Amino acid sequence: MLVVLQNAGAERAGRWLVRGVDLAIAPGEIVTLVGPNGSGKSTTAKLALGVMTPDEGSVRRRAGLAIGYVPQKLAIDWTLPLSVKRFMGLTARLSDAAIGEALEATGVRHLLGEEMATLSGGEFQRVLLARAMARKPDLLVLDEPVQGVDFSGEIRLYELIGEIRDRLQCGILMISHDLHVVMAATDRVLCLNGHVCCSGTPTAVAASEGYKALFGGRAEPMLAVYEHHHDHVHLADGRVRHSDGTVTDHCHREDGHHRGDHPHDPAHSHSHSPAHSPAHSPAHAHGQPHGHGETGREDSDA
C-alpha cells in the first residue's frame, strides 16, 4: 500500500475536523473523497500527504513515496507574464524533454509557449496535471481536478486521469465537493461529513435520456451519480444531533458505528440513488484567471 489511514482524525481548537477515517490506497487505484464544504476532505488528504499529523489513529506512508499534487488554488500573481514552460518548472527542475513528454501526455504540448492567464479552464487543468505527472509520482493527489471546466470537458478530464493512472500505475486520491457527479471509473469513493459516511465502489450510473444527451455517448460508462441524504448534524464536541433533536455519541444509535470496519467495506445505510438532474454548473467565469480565482469552494476544514 502507498498510504494507509487507520481510524485517523484531526482536531483544531477543540473541534474535530474529521474522525474515524479508514483509507488505504494501492498502486494503480483511484480513490475519490466527496462531500460538502467543511466535510473533512482537505484534512483527510493532508493527513495522507503528511502535511498534518493525526490527533487520533495512525497514518502510514510507504518509504520513499513520491507524490504529485494538483492544488485547488495557486498562490501566484497572475498579472505577471508566465508561460506554460516557465510554470512547469516553478517547483521542480524538469528537463525540456520531461516537460514536453508530460504536456504531450495530457494533450497540450502545443501550449508550451502560451501565457498561463490566457488558457481555458480545461487547458489550465491539463497543464496542472502535466506538471504533477512529470515527476513520475507514486501517488497523485488531485484537489477539485475539474473545476472551471464544463460538463463535456469534465468527462474528457476524467478519462485523462484514468489514462495517467494506467500510464504511471500510480495511486490517485481525488477530492471533490460535488456529491452528484462522481467518476464511475473510480475504484472507491469515500463520502465524508466529518467522518466516513459511506464508502465502496460506485455502482449507480446516470440513466435518464436527458443526462445521456447532455454528456454524450461516453457519459454512461464514465459517470455515476449519487444523491446523498444526511439525517444528522455533527457538533463541535464530536457528538451527533439527529433529526428528531436527540444527541448521541455516535451516528448510529444502535451500534455506535457509522462506517465499515475495513476501508474496502461498503458502509452504512445512507441511501444512494441515481439522480437524473445534475445540479452542477461550470465554476469558471469569463474574465477571471482560469482555475485559480475560485472562492467559496475550498473546504473550511483547511
Image (spheres, rainbow, N blue to C red):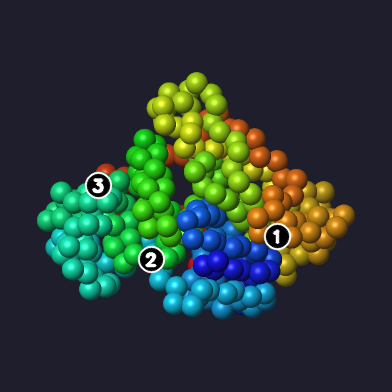
The residue that mark 3 highlights is 107
Tell me the quarter of the image containing the N terminus.
Answer: bottom right
Q: Residue at x 56, y 33 (%)?
A: 205
Rounded to the nearest angstrom, the CA distance separating label 2 from label 3 is 19 Å
Residue 148 against residue 44 in the figure, above or below: above
Indicate left or right for 134 with 79 as reference. right
Residue 237 pos. (x, y %): 72, 70
Residue 114 pos. (x, y %): 14, 54
Residue 300, labelled with which disc? Answer: none
Specify which label sits upstream in the sequence, 2 or 3. Answer: 3
Residue 150 visible in the displayed image: no
Specify which label sits upstream in the sequence, 1 or 3. Answer: 3
The residue that mark 2 highlights is 137
The residue that mark 1 highlights is 262
**Residue type highlighted by circle 3:** Gly
Q: Secondary structure at mark 2?
A: loop
**Residue type highlighted by circle 2:** Pro
Q: Secondary structure at mark 1?
A: loop
Q: Residue furthest left?
A: 113
Q: Residue at x 76, y 64 (%)?
A: 239
Rounded to the nearest angstrom, the CA distance separating label 1 from label 3 is 38 Å
Q: Residue at x 52, y 41 (%)?
A: 184
Tell me if mark 1 has few (under 14), some (14-19) or many (20+) residues whose alpha carbon lies within 10 angstroms of its own.
Answer: few
Tell me if mark 2 has few (under 14), some (14-19) or many (20+) residues whose alpha carbon lies within 10 angstroms of its own.
Answer: some
Indicate left or right for 245 with 283 as reference. right
Q: Secondary structure at mark 3?
A: loop
Q: Residue furthest top?
A: 209
Indicate left or right for 103 with 135 as reference. left
Specify which label sits upstream in the sequence, 1 or 2. Answer: 2
